[in-house]
């Protein structure tokens, strides 16, 4: 499959409506841009949206790590370079590099995905499907030298006492939902930033983010968020239906 490119590139422009305090791109928007680059990369691998629609499949992200040198600013152009780097039965690895308009590396990311049935969102093994092409790897390079990590996710009663209230509550309203009919993965980052900002954290100091997605959140569902500090890192935990684990975001802050 020599026609598969080693990398997939996506050029982007930072709009005012995508920026927050300090005219910096929202981190959640950047994660959405990474997802857009991943979709373009899936086309280059022969597993684009057209093929998936025909076979009633979809991509679902399980984990992502994002390390930031700086966020793009309003009016900036920037480039995302991405590549699929491993396939392990159900799991597809995809890494990213983010470059400024002058070619500086300003961010890196790794991620883990599954191909899933569109209706049930249960994972499928593409190698066992004769109606699907062979799934290729673009480049086996790991941007962090390791696969995307898993974050410890304790039960709710470990994070918060029974009477303790969440630091913030979020709902799966219409604009939170994506084409897969659940809360888009980028919104969990926005929710985590909201939780930290509400509780006095300087979110501009966040330099490394690891997100694990455990459960889908569907239309109308409520998610309660809690904050904990673990080994110098700040974690935001999201639960629905009292104790169903939804997502965990582990963040490392720069020293002032």
Image (cartoon, rainbow, N blue to C red):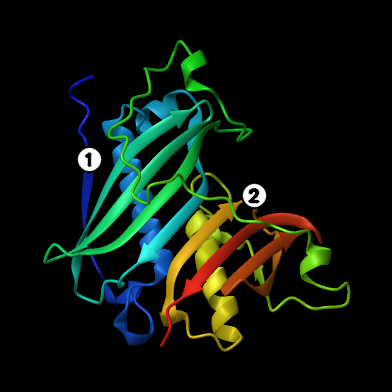
Residue drawn at point x = 35 percent, y = 33 percent: 48
| Residues under numbered marks 2 and 1 in contact, where contact means CB atoms less than 8 Å apart | no
Residue 232: where, in percent of width, then height? Answer: 57, 75
- The image position of residue 227, as x and y in percent, is 66, 74
Closest to the observer, 173 or 197: 197
Disc 1 on helix, strand or loop?
loop
Of all residues, the one furthest to the left in this rendering is: 102
Q: Quadrant of residue 92?
A: top left
Q: Residue furthest top?
A: 130
Residue occupied by mark 1: 7
Q: CA distance from mark 2 to mark 1?
A: 29 Å
Please determine whether, in this image, residue 135 is positioned above or below residue 11: above
Residue ID for mark 2: 214
Q: Is residue 46 above or below residue 67?
A: above
Nearer to me, 53 or 146: 146
Q: Quadrant of the N terminus?
A: top left
Residue 80, percent from left and from top: 25, 54
Q: Earlier in the sequence, mark 2 or mark 1?
A: 1
- The residue lying at 48 percent from left, 21 percent from top is 126
Q: Is residue 223 left or right of residue 18?
A: right
Q: Decide which of 115, 97 is in the foreground and name it.
A: 97
Residue 3 visible in the displayed image: yes
Residue 151 is drawn in which quadrant?
bottom right
Q: Residues within 10 Å of mark 1 (few under 14, many from 20)?
A: some
Residue 183 visible in this rendered orientation of the protein:
no
């Amino acid at each position: 499959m020599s026609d598969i490119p080693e990398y997939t590139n996506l050029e982007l422009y930072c709009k005012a409506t995508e920026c927050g305090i300090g005219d910096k791109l929202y981190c959640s928007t950047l994660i959405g841009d990474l997802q857009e680059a991943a979709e373009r990369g899936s086309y280059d691998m022969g597993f684009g949206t057209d093929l998936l629609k025909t076979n009633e499949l979809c991509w679902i992200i399980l984990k992502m790590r994002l390390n930031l040198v700086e966020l793009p600013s309003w009016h900036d152009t920037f480039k995302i370079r991405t590549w699929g780097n491993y396939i392990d039965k159900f799991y597809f690895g995809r890494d990213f590099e983010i470059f400024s308009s002058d070619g500086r590396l300003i961010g890196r990311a790794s991620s883990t995905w599954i191909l899933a049935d569109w209706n049930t969102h249960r994972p499928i093994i593409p190698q066992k499907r004769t109606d699907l092409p062979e799934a290729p790897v673009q480049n086996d390079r790991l941007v962090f030298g390791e696969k995307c990590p898993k974050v410890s996710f304790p039960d709710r009663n470990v994070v918060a006492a029974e009477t303790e209230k969440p630091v913030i509550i979020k709902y799966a309203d219409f604009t939170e939902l994506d084409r897969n009919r659940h809360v888009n993965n980028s919104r969990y980052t926005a929710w985590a930033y909201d939780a930290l900002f509400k509780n006095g954290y300087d979110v501009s100091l966040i330099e490394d983010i690891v997100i694990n997605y455990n459960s889908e959140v569907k239309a109308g569902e409520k998610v309660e968020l809690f904050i904990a500090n673990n080994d110098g890192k700040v974690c935001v935990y999201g639960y629905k239906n009292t104790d169903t684990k939804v997502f965990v975001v582990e963040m490392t802050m720069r020293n002032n």
